[in-house]
Amino acid sequence: MNRALKGLVAFVTTVALGTALAQQATPAAAASATPVADMMQPADSTPALTAQDLGSLFDGLMPYALHRNDIAGGVVAVVKDGRVLFARGYGYADLARRIPVSADSTLFRPGSTSKLFTWIAVMQLVEQGKLDLDRDVNDYLDFRIPAWHGKPITLRELMTHTPGFEDVTRGLMPATPDQVNLERYLKERLPARIFPPGELVAYSNYGCGVAGYIVQRIAGEPYEQYVEQHILKPLGMDHSTFTQPLSPALAPLMSKGYLRASDGKPQPFELVDPAPAGAMSTTAADMAKFMIAQLQDGRYGDTGILQPATTRLMHSPQYAPAPDMPGFDLGFYQEDRNGLRIIGHAGDTVVFHSDLHLLLDKNVGLFLSFNSAGNPDAGGTLTLRRSIFHAFLDRYFPSPLPARTPAPASAKTDAARVAGWYQSTRRNDSAMKLFNLLSQFQVAAAPDGTLTVSPMLVDTAGQPLRWREVAPLQYREVNGRDQLRFVAGADGRIRYWTTTYIPAVMLFQRMPAARGKGTVLPLAGLSMLVVLLALASWGLGRWLRRHYHATLKLPPGLHRTRLYSRLGALVLFLDLIGWFVLLGSVGTHLSLLLQGGAAPWMTLLYVIGVVALLGVLAIVLHAVNGWRLAARSLRVRLGETVLALAALYLGWFILAFGLVSFNTHF
């Protein structure tokens, strides 16, 4: 179950290696295999960014990467100065039929990279004066999104992922095509607002769906058709579509998707709803055309999809979580590194994983995509993609590591100040508070004032990175270049942290100590152990009495409460075990989450939770009666009191983490 829960956490927060070996689709290499970062050490002198050098680089790297990470196939495209420098496929698009990946014709699913096309569609209508980035989106909708204390949501906030929505995943990947319906999805899945608009970034698929629906309504044609006619066709992206399922012409070109290459089992074509958030199917060659258009002020050859001024506006900063830290442009997140101005977007389905990066000052674009989830023990595709991108930058656009500066005198004090538990702003508070608890990250302070953030900010070997303070509440990776920044409120209390280690698609908020994972889980675990021991002792006592033909003599007032307390303890224990089993099952069967299959099980557990709370009252009442009637030994009364305290904590746990909320809007 531990691995299942880790898998679930990795999926939802997120959200991120020779040729013969990869072509045989063999299992991942042992954990001792050379990390991909070590395969891509920068050259002694900076090589020119040429097709030949890129071929040497990726022909050596990608087969190893596929093998080590247990991935069936991948694709790379690099553009520069308006032309395609390199585009090549590696591994297999279909393991059973031994069909190799082709950069020109094999379709991959870029996931949330699809959002960039939605944002371009929005900006096309802004150019035409049909949309206003700062107008209440309700003015364009046929349903209403409630305002936050009088503050409406704008398109600008949707494009920077700051509308304040909680995250929703139910129905994100429907089981059948008839369940894909943009309008119905948006009206039935309206998420709660958990933040004021424009203040905190919390990545939202729903928000992008709203933008796509606005495009559909204002343009007067289905979203998929609009994107095809106004973006894909003008760019010559003839092997790209948002249509689900694929047309007969494109379906044979679609790569199979795999959880791991070694199991060889292709997964079904993944349907995505809302389509504007991630339904695209495309090739690396087509994505190269898209990158060229973005780097050429909205033009590809003689065709323009945006005016130069509009493109530059999309590439301009709109939101920053902290001064001098990367944030969001209009739809693109910022990835500044090696002194370069970089924007981009990643995309993940269950089995396809992609990255797109635009080096604006160098007129260079890089697109990566893989058709397997891969081996999580080797870091998965998130670590792989990050390593490839950073090593690509360090090879062709190297920059010296920042000079080490003395730590401020307050380093140890600041480290103690920021230490604690944090949770992501990208979360669901309506129905997934228990999952939020399990997903918290710990900022730990070392005696020398350095920090670690576990289990999130880790190296390619999975070891926590160390962070040294360089200015008050500003940290830099030890022997690295990434930054970690803590933001305090007007009262001096730490509000959240942000980092360049990952794009600023979410922030991490400080949790009160009583709600921190390091406090709650040990106390809950201890309390459950007390309940389990009580159940075991009662069972043993009953067996002994039956074996020795003994009877238990109790005053009349204790017989009934004793029975209810024991039933209550059993229901309480089973209810909490049930929740952890459900979360573990979701971690190994994501369809329970994405297709809503967890909902009836949650409802059942909610009902059991109500009974469990009644059981808590029975346990407490029985303990009180034991002292009031003074009819039992001190040892027994103390035991019943300890059980009552444990039950009270577990009752608080059930209430605090929404385990009787009867909410299935996850």
Image (spheres, helix red, strand yellow):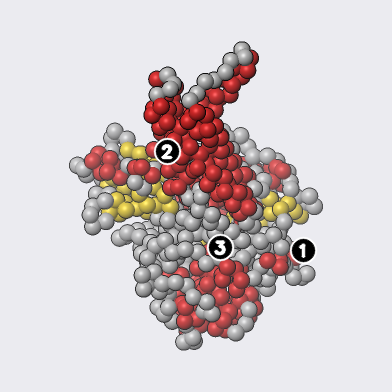
The picture quadrant where one finds residue 513 is top left
What kind of element bears circle 3?
helix
Q: Nearer the viewer, mark 1 or mark 3?
A: 3
Q: Are marks 3 and 2 in contact (CB under 8 Å)?
A: no
Give the residue at the far front of this rendering: 556
| Crowd around label 1: few <14 · some 14–19 · many ≥20 (10 Å) | few
Task: Using the image as rendered, state which of residue 548 and residue 187 is in the foreground.
Answer: 548
Find residue 649 and name its label. Answer: 2
Q: Is residue 173 left or right of residue 127?
A: right
Q: Which residue is mark 1?
A: 252
The picture quadrant where one finds residue 276 is bottom right
> What residue type is disc 1 on?
Pro
Q: As displayed, is residue 553 above or below residue 8?
A: above
Residue at coordinates 32% horizontally, 59% vertically from top-left? 322
Task: Using the image as rendered, state which of residue 86 and residue 313 is in the foreground.
Answer: 313
Instruction: Identify the mark nearer the N-term, 1 or 2.
Output: 1
Q: Which residue is mark 3?
A: 112
